[in-house]
């Protein structure tokens, strides 16, 4: 029996057109020809066929018995060590072929690859990079690399090649000339045209040469979407950075997401990675623009639903996924002014952060004294001794040189007199809390105390952006965090930059010859999720003030947090739901709120839809089961089925409690 992989390979062979020269040179390298290149760099604009060529090369390498390592630049970590772990066989196993597609999304690795990674390759290995940008000129000009590197800058198909695509797709002969005038030799446009033709989209008007190429082709391919659920699945895929079946299940509860995911996967402009599906970049932008124009309310509703899910994951995801989740959330709002700056990173200055190592301290102190003076350097020495885990050191990806560091302090109540006597900035932050809303025992404050980047001192930079992302994620996941503070020397300028997200405390403490501004937010009054949405999407409606101090999104998150902390009385007492109107004026806030939650869960069983949901909530949170998997076993359910009932239960419970929050049954 022929395997699925073999069938896919044969289909690719039948559909593949052109690129004979590139494949011939790669074939020589696979055969071990002495003069053949070691590294291949495939480049060209979106839709030119880079990924298709890489898949064909991979088929050739697999047929030659080579071990393959295939990476997608969209999902490569900013830390070179993570890339090295993922590509490990390339360094250890002779004959391995490393493929990195969408290299433009991790272009900051380029110098590091040439300098530090590729020279350590195992014997007889090959590497193939594919991206939109050409390689940096120093590599093609370098006498050593120029003999090992083969740059393949892809061109559009010739007319003969383009016509063969349409013939293979059975496009009607009378339409081929129109299609060629419409799509030219662009492989993506031609492949979409071929898919449209094979789907029976043969109407002459589809190929109107005056229409937008991709939009018309996508409309011809998708046509009338089978159901409203399919339309919502498209809305997810058009906006989410990557779409997994699990994500669909979460944001489209009650739908047959396995069917929807399979349908999305079969669309010819969808690409698959280990993290899920994503449309080709050009197709995504076209699809998103079309959806926003045709159904703006549905588009915004889905974006909000996705944001809610990412905010939930920000609290609940495993530690190693936190930064991926942050990227997913920011990607949703990539067109906003704030996010455009946050994510417009050039490859020359890419950095990654690591924990402070004792050997780093001299560099850290030198940078501090250079930018803030000797008095500030002594404070860095003090805090590095007290909280070394609070420090992150930033290195250039290309060279490993330390260029910056930050420190995010965690300070529990009551304040330590030694800290107050030593650091005027920390003392000013504590004084502000005492004057506004004191921090209770068991709570703490977070202070982004130092952000030292001598080459771009306290101006918007990637160091500040990465540190802010970490601070935001830490605030979302921390238990008992009462306040968050940021410290900037140019107080007046930063007061404008953070207006609407951080309050100016008015404090201007002095350290050495400089004064600093202290800016903060009371997380007990402003849920982290609501604050983060205001930060990344300034046009969003501000969080409501009044009897209910939280938005619906934040309220739902607070319910989930309360359930997650059910067995930890101290954590439950500090959860955000205690600050909702539900808990106002209770004689025994913790006990009565717990009773209210239990009652609301039990009442779900009165609705036939809620019986299994009630069982899932009870087993997951109230039964003492150590994990959600154990709760599923107690109910005798497959884990996926249990999770579906649990999600439905959470949705029903949050809706019920929200009505009580709005209308106050007391």
Image (tube, helix red, strand yellow):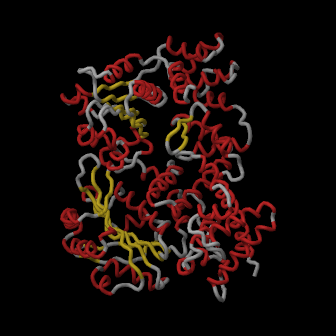
Image quadrant containing the N terminus: top right
Q: Where is residue 17 in the image (x, y as percent from the top left)?
A: 49, 18
Compared with 122, 408 (above or below) is below
Q: Where is residue 276 in the image (x, y as percent from the top left)?
A: 54, 43
Residue in view at x 64 percent, y 14 percent: 175
Quadrant of res 552? bottom right
Image quadrant containing the C terminus: bottom right
Is 568 in front, or is 372?
A: 568
Residue in view at x 61 percent, y 18 percent: 169
- Taking the view exactly as shown, the residue that stands out farthest to the bottom is 587
Residue 489 visible at all: no
Q: Is residue 515 left or right of residue 9?
A: left
Is 480 in front, or is 643?
A: 643
Compared with 119, 474 (above or below) is below
Residue in view at x 69 percent, y 22 percent: 200
Q: Where is residue 100 in the image (x, y as percent from the top left)?
A: 39, 36
Q: Where is residue 629 in the image (x, y as percent from the top left)?
A: 59, 61
Residue in view at x 59 percent, y 13 percent: 167
Residue 409 visible at all: yes
Quadrant of res 628? bottom right
Q: Is residue 93 left or right of residue 163?
A: left
Number of marks? 0
Q: In this view, does 108 lie to the left or right of 623?
A: left
């Amino acid at each position: 029996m022929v395997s699925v992989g073999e069938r896919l390979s044969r289909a690719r062979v039948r559909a593949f057109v052109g690129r004979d020269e590139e494949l011939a040179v790669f074939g020589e390298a696979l055969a071990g020809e002495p003069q053949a290149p070691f590294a291949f760099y495939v480049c060209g604009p979106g839709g030119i066929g880079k990924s298709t060529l890489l898949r064909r090369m991979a088929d050739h390498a697999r047929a030659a018995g080579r071990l393959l390592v295939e990476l997608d630049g969209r999902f490569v970590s900013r830390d070179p060590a993570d890339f090295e772990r993922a590509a490990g066989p390339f360094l250890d196993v002779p004959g391995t072929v490393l493929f990195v597609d969408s290299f433009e999304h991790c272009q900051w690795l380029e110098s590091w690859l040439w300098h530090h990674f590729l020279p350590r390759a195992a014997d007889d290995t090959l590497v193939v990079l594919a991206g939109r940008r050409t390689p940096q000129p120093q590599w093609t000009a370098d006498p050593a690399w120029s003999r090992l590197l083969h740059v393949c800058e892809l061109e559009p198909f010739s007319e003969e090649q383009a016509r063969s695509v349409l013939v293979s797709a059975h496009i009607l002969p009378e339409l081929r000339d129109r299609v060629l005038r419409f799509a030219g030799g662009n492989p993506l446009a031609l492949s979409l045209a071929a898919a449209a033709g094979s789907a029976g989209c043969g109407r002459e008007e589809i190929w109107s040469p005056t229409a937008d190429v991709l939009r018309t082709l996508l409309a011809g391919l998708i046509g009338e979407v089978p159901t409203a659920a399919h339309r919502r699945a498209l809305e997810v895929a058009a906006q989410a950075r990557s779409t997994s079946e699990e994500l669909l299940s979460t944001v489209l509860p009650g739908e047959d997401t396995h069917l929807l995911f399979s349908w999305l996967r079969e669309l010819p402009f969808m690409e698959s990675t280990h993290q899920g599906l994503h449309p080709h970049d050009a197709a995504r932008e076209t699809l998103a623009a079309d959806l926003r124009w045709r159904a703006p309310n549905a588009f915004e509703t889905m974006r909000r639903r996705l944001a809610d899910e990412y905010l939930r994951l920000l609290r609940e995801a495993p530690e190693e996924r936190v930064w991926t989740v942050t990227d997913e959330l920011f990607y949703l709002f990539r067109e906003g002014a704030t996010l455009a700056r946050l994510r417009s990173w050039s490859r020359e200055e890419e950095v990654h952060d690591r924990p402070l190592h004792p050997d780093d301290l001299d560099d850290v102190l030198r940078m501090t004294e250079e930018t803030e003076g000797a008095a500030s350097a002594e404070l860095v020495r003090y805090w590095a001794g007290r909280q070394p885990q609070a420090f992150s050191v930033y290195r250039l990806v290309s060279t490993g040189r330390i260029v910056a560091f930050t420190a995010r302090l965690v300070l529990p109540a009551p304040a330590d007199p030694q800290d107050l006597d030593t650091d005027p900035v920390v003392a000013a932050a504590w004084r502000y809390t005492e004057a506004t809303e004191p921090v209770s025992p068991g709570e703490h404050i977070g202070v982004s105390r130092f952000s030292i980047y001598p080459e771009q001192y306290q101006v918007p930079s990637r160091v500040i952006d990465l540190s802010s992302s970490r601070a935001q994620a830490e605030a979302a996941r921390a238990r008992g965090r009462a306040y968050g503070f940021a410290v900037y020397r140019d107080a007046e300028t930063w007061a404008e930059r953070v207006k609407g997200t951080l309050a100016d405390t008015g404090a201007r403490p002095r350290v050495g010859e400089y004064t600093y501004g202290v800016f903060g937010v009371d997380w007990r009054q402003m849920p982290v999720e609501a604050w983060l949405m205001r930060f990344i999407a300034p046009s969003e409606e501000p969080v409501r003030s009044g009897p209910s101090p939280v938005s619906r999104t934040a309220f739902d998150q607070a319910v989930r947090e309360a359930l997650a902390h059910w067995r930890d009385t101290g954590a439950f007492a500090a959860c955000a739901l205690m600050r909702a109107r539900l808990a106002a004026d209770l004689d025994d806030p913790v006990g009565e709120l717990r009773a209210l939650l239990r009652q609301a869960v039990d009442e779900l069983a009165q609705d036939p839809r809620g019986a299994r949901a009630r069982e899932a909530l009870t087993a997951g949170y109230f039964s003492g089961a150590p994990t959600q998997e154990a709760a599923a076993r107690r109910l005798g359910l497959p884990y996926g089925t249990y999770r579906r009932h649990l999600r439905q239960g959470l949705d029903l419970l949050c809706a019920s409690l929200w009505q009580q929050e709005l209308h106050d049954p007391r």
